[in-house]
Amino acid sequence: MKKGKKVISFFMVLAMFVFSLPMQVFAEEIGESRLFSVDFSPKVDMNREFNPDIYTYTTSVNTSEKSIAVTPYAMDSNTTIRVNGTVVTNGTPSLPITLDQEITLITIEVQSIDVPSNVKNYVFSVKKTINLDDTGLKSIVVEGATVDHPFSTEKSYYTGRVEATQSYVSVKTTAFNSAITKINGNLVSSSGSLVVEMKTGINTIFVEMTSLNGASKSYTFVLTKPEANNNANIRSILINGKDFAENGSVFVDYVSSNATNLNVVINPSDNFSSINLDGKYVTAGSSTNLNLRQESINVFPIVITAANGITTKTYNLHIIRLGTSNSTTGDVNNNAASGTSYAGNTSLAVDSKGDVVVTDGAGATTTLSRQGSGRLHSVNLDTQAIQKILRSNSKVSEIVVDYSKKTGLNDSLNLNIDSTLTKLLQDRKVKVKLMSINGYATADLTLLRDWNNGGSITISRANIGVNYEDEYIPASGFIRFEYTGGPLGVYNPLDIEIPIYSDADVKLANVYRFDEISGFTLIPSTTEEKVKRSKGVSDGDFIVMNFKKSFTDIKNHWSFKLLDFMSKKQVISGYPDDSFRPDRYVTRAEFTSMLIKAISEHLDTVNVGEEPFSDVNTNDWYYAVVDEGWKAALITGITSDSFGPNQNITREQMAAIAVRAFNQLKTLPEMTTTQANSILGKYNDSKVVSSWAKVDLATAIDHKIIDGLGNNRLASRDLATRAQAATVVYKVLNESIGF
């Protein structure tokens, strides 16, 4: 037998099985002399649960019992056990012990055979009581406390709690007159009550019922009163068994379109705080079933009230229904067991767009394995099959690895590409698109480093608890895009797409990248149906959300809808007081900043070197945007060396900059002076348009970037307002690359 730990003997295990003990017992060390457990026949009512390190107990049996037998269970089988001086075999009953009329003492001595000096004595005081059910005890109620178990005459020990703000509880008993009742030593009537003060910490209430013949039975209530702290935080929350750590005020999870309910367990930081879930109080750490409404997004409020009864904190549980059951759970292979492989032998083909579609039925071998609550699809491309089609067809532009209907919501999709195929794809400049139900990633392998031995791309759902700061409403979960190696240079290798299964306004939503250091970073994106796209991103965790804030002074303005949209897209910003001041004139630097902020990711460098303007200094707030605007050839000066950053911009100046920006995003056909004069000639004030601005202004009108004003006026030399500037930026984006 291994030194330092002894396994209980076979006979002990057999005895434990017979007497239904729930676990196997191990001695902690040589010389162990403690009991693990003890049984009485007939059963006794003990004043506390048995604990190997507590040696004195008060018990009671019915007054009709004449004798009692004791069955001791020692932690170490190599012990000698004596019950009232008589040796008893470990795990077997003692001889019957005669019960005295009032109190009988039973001593269990446990002595180690290995270390005889190690002796433990357990003393049980057995008191005869009458069955108080027969004498009329009906109930004991502790008003003002939460007790762990409903009262029963068979159960004598209770635990519970009171709120930190509770100063007293009222203990009420109900019994026939034949029973004498004492509460904490105070005599009360058989159906009386006593108010007991509650102090911070442990409070014990002792209720004793005595019949006329002297037999009695006692009940103990141990109530805990916490300190009046202000901790109203959630430590974690389990949603259908998935654990989410608290790191913000919103928890988000997804269910299938036909789900009807879900299971929630809330663990507060302080177990003495109270929890209100969707209008109902629930117990900390206990399971609560929530019925789901038919809406695509169910929001359940959670209100935590601290132990002080004053401090509260509100959380929201967002449950988002996903698409149809086929699109969210995968197809017939969804229940494949761990280790299952599936491969196809269907020949590959090039479609009209130059794509070669690869899936488990063609061009790939896939291995499934269990991963948490989902599965890992490990996909290996068929190098020979893809080499063959690449070498026979020069029009291939993309390998599309489509597992969007093979993956489930909790699944991870991992694509492995060997070194041979990597080099061929890089040489041919063929991109690889990996498609999971959770998102799509298109990788330009020429922009990746450390792929000499091949590499991998992975898409999975990420469970991240974050602080949404009451500014965002999630429209998707966190999607993690990963690849081996890193970007080769300054350009990021991934274009990502995130499908939206909720009924959120997808065009209004934005894509954000999250990391623990920077928090949320807005990523430029476009929209097509229910998919958000972002180009040129690195690996990381991404989420689609709606930005909640808008401006306080635009509700009754002609541009309200547009400004509200641009605010929620976080393209334009306002003042510290959350106003936008739509009718204030905008300077040349401010308009440049507004436009550059919106389209910076899409600009090419045309001019090399620093901007040439003497009135733009490196310590000016607008230096960076003016420099970028000049490098992209969007702006020119009012003179050869002056930009006039603080001058208010005119409508024709704004139109000229906007047209140059539009040309960077979407090439415009050249317009002749004759065509420009024809377009401008429709307006009453066309003759006052500056000669240098005519073609640009006409182009802006022709492509709906700028509109005329009332009375058929262009007002080309009028100063532009912030609302007009925001409208122009919106139209540049919307008419070129979209939102």
Image (tube, rainbow, N blue to C red):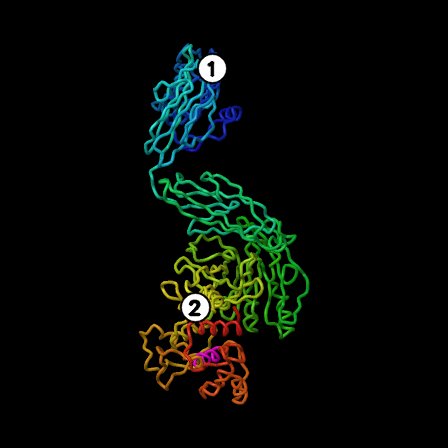
Residue at the spot of label 1: 135
Up the image or down, 184 lies above or below 522; here it is above
Disc 2 packing (10 Å; few <14; some 14–19; many ≥20): many
Report the label total: 2
**Residue 547 in magenta?**
no
Nearest to the observer: residue 440 or residue 451:
440
User: Can residue 205 be seen?
Assistant: yes
Image spot of residue 299 (x, y percent): 51, 50
Magenta span dominant secondary structure: helix
Amino acid type at circle 1 is Thr
**Closest to the observer, 97 or 729:** 729
Given the current orientation, which residue lies at the most extreme right position? 346
Q: Identify the residue at the far bottom of this view.
A: 674
Q: Is residue 660 magenta?
A: yes
Find residue 33 and report its horizontal and vertical position in percent: 38, 25
Q: Are marks 2 and 1 in contact (CB under 8 Å)?
A: no
What numbered label is drawn on residue 572?
2
Residue 327 image-quadrant placement? bottom right
Q: Quadrant of residue 466?
A: bottom left
Label 1 SS: helix
Picture coordinates of residue 608, whole percent (x, y): 40, 81
Would residue 243 appear left or right of 334 to someone viewing this image?
Answer: left
Front residue of 662/23: it is 662
Q: Amino acid at mark 2?
A: Ile
> Could you tell me which secondary element the residue under label 2 belongs to?
loop
Which residues, given as a range, are shown in magenta? 653-661
| Residue at left offset 48%, top offset 41% | 280
Residue 448 seen in render: no
Residue 551, quarter of the rendered image: bottom left
